[in-house]
Image (spheres, rainbow, N blue to C red):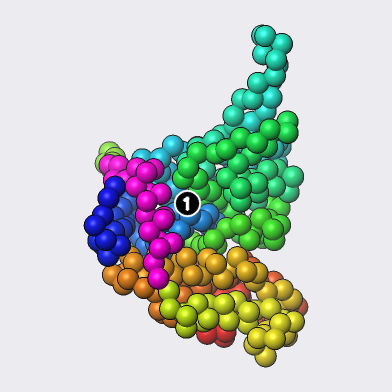
Amino acid sequence: MQHRSDVEAADALRQAYQQISAEIGNVIIGQHDVLKFVLISIFSNGHCLLVGVPGLAKTLLVQTVARVLDLDFKRIQFTPDLMPSDIIGSEILGEDRNFKFIPGPVFANIILADEINRTPPKTQAALLEAMQEKAVTAAGITHRLARPFFVLATQNPIEQEGTYPLPEAQLDRFMFNVALDYPTFAEELQVVKNTTSTLEPTVKSLLNAEQIMHFQQLVRNIPVTDNVLEYAVKLVAKTRPGGEHAAPQVKRLLNWGAGPRASQFLILGAKCHAVINGKYSPDIEDVRAIAKPILRHRIVRSYHAEAEGLSPDDIIEQLF
């Protein structure tokens, strides 16, 4: 996939994004912001966590994205009795008396980790190495995963029965934490109309693995001015209660702030957000547009913030 210049490649990415959004819109009604963040995370080579109550088409969205991008897709249903070997695979004794590795469902391009917080931390941690290193280790041997590789996880709200909160280390691996809300009345009307008739919407594949990796490289090549870099890093530094750049209210409202990975994702995400909106370099508005889903799962509220009913998004809004 060759382009004469980076400008031409950026235009191709924006066009691909618009076509993909339109194609997925044939199946998914509404959820425009959610789809935008999922696609930005894919083009930025990140992972995405979708949080919402059951029945908001989280699973259908991920399946549709995989079909449109023509990627190998596997779904892992997380349950309390799921074992790490059920995810990464295991060694078995073959007929020739030698052990051989049988790959688990993690060996695919897109992994849907469905209801990831329904399984205990030991099994949640089995995804950690795969998400960070793009490889898994079984019986001391490292196996590389397919490229591109994304984990799109769905999570039920923590207050629900039988959920295990994800450890901070695992949450930090996700580029975005995207909150799904109920559809509007008009959208729900359309959903019910489409899903209670014989109509079966279909989607066609628009990209392949090689093109996606090409666009991921393009996103990294996009130039960023120093003032945008400084804004992103300072925004993250403001969330750290003990740091020199901590915002005054943060010392009272937060116990922990975001780490350096948040700054990296802010810049990568802002680059991609700029391109899909027709710009060739991100500005401060692009950083702000993606800041909430990047920061909301990386800050830990204090007792004062919870007592005052302040959500992570309220605190991030104050930091702007």
Nearer-the-camera pick, 249 or 53: 249
Instruction: Say few, some or many: other residues with alpha carbon within 10 Å of mark 1 (under 14 / 14 to 19 / 20 or more).
Output: many
Please provide percent x and percent y for residue 157: 61, 59
Which residue occupies 63% across, 79% down?
Answer: 237
Is 185 on the left or on the right of 135, as rendered?
left
Can the viewer see residue 95 in this picture?
yes
Image quarter for residue 160? bottom right
In magenta stretch: residue 29: no
Single out the residue that lies furthest toward the top: 95
Nearer-the-camera pick, 2 or 263: 2
Please provide percent x and percent y for residue 241: 72, 81
Can the viewer see residue 56 in this picture?
no
The amino acid pointed to by label 1 is: Lys
Mark 1 sits on what residue?
58
Which residue occupies 50% across, 45% down?
Answer: 149
Which residue occupies 59% across, 32% down?
Answer: 104
Image quarter for residue 224? bottom left
